[in-house]
Image (cartoon, grey):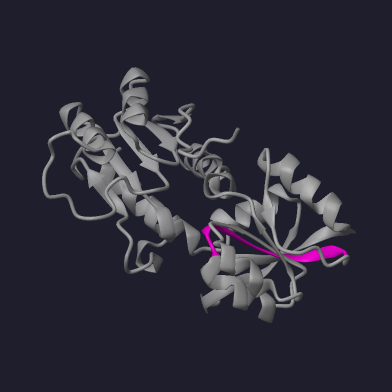
Amino acid sequence: MKISLLLEELNQWAPFKNAEDYDNIGLLTGQLKTAVSGVLVALDSTEEVVQEAIDKNCNTIIAFHPIVFKGLKQLNGKTYVEKAIVKAIQNNINIIALHTALDNVAHGVSGRMLQELNAEPLHILDAKSENHGLGMVGQLQTPHSEEDFFQLLKNTFHLKTLRHSKLLAKPVEKIAVLGGSGSFAIELAKKCQVDAYISADFKYHDFFAADDELLLVDIGHYESEQFTKNLIVEFLTEKFTNFVVILSQTKTNPVNYF
């Protein structure tokens, strides 16, 4: 099967037209006419991931984050982006990125977060149409105390730590989730009258915005998106049987904890 057909199927599953205007998705390296011999699925297509694809005889990487996000003025292998692209081109590795195309569907990144929490999906948080938008609102199977909810998050997302706003001494049942950077949607979460909003990359002043109306929880950018590659693998293995699909084992989280 050719790259062009793979892209068509991905486009049906997570429409590329729904990606944010600032994004850079689709085929980043490679040619449409190339036949797919194997797919490695990863969150990031770093140089280490490209090497993993080479070692595992996969000529295609489907990554969540685009390795090329801002414009490149040279390819000298000086930066981590340049190193990855040079290695990919030298070894005929195709790189496809999905990013906000997969963020903007109900069954995508945020929907998978709800699934991992065993929460019932209710509706899109930042809806741009009935089936298109960022974040999801859902309901837990049973109300949780704030402390129990934190433990559920730690267990589910394999967290060593999390950051949160002031405790409100209220049960948590209705929640909003948004994978990746989600501070822009705090007011939307408040309007949805959720008990807690779970996302990442909240700054100091963002926590004040909770304003005793909800619990804000920052679980980390990588941590909130970690199950996205499992989601992609499941789609590919169900859809295609004519090439191998491998879940990357390379750790690409640039944040470490002590």
Q: At which x and y percent is residue 216?
A: 68, 64
- Image quadrant in which the C terminus is located: top right
184 within the magenta span? no
Front position in the image: 33 or 116: 116
Q: Is residue 133 above or below residue 11?
A: below
Residue shown at 58% from the left, 36% from the top? 257
Q: In this view, does 94 lie above or below 72?
A: above
Residue shown at 64% from the left, 66% from the top? 207
Left or right of 120 in this view: 135: left
Q: In this view, does 21 lie above or below 46?
A: below
Magenta span main SS: strand
Residue shown at 48% from the left, 38% from the top? 253
Left or right of 122 in this view: 237: left
Front position in the image: 175 or 160: 160
Q: At which x and y percent is residue 97?
A: 35, 48
Q: At which x and y percent is residue 187?
A: 61, 78
181 within the magenta span? yes
Residue 198 position by quadrant = bottom right
Task: Give the magenta range.
Answer: 171-182
Determine the residue located farthest toward the bottom in the rendered image.
191
Q: At which x and y percent is residue 77?
A: 18, 33
Left or right of 63 in this view: 86: left
Residue 209 showing in the rendered view? yes
- Image quadrant in which the N terminus is located: top left
Front position in the image: 28 or 6: 28
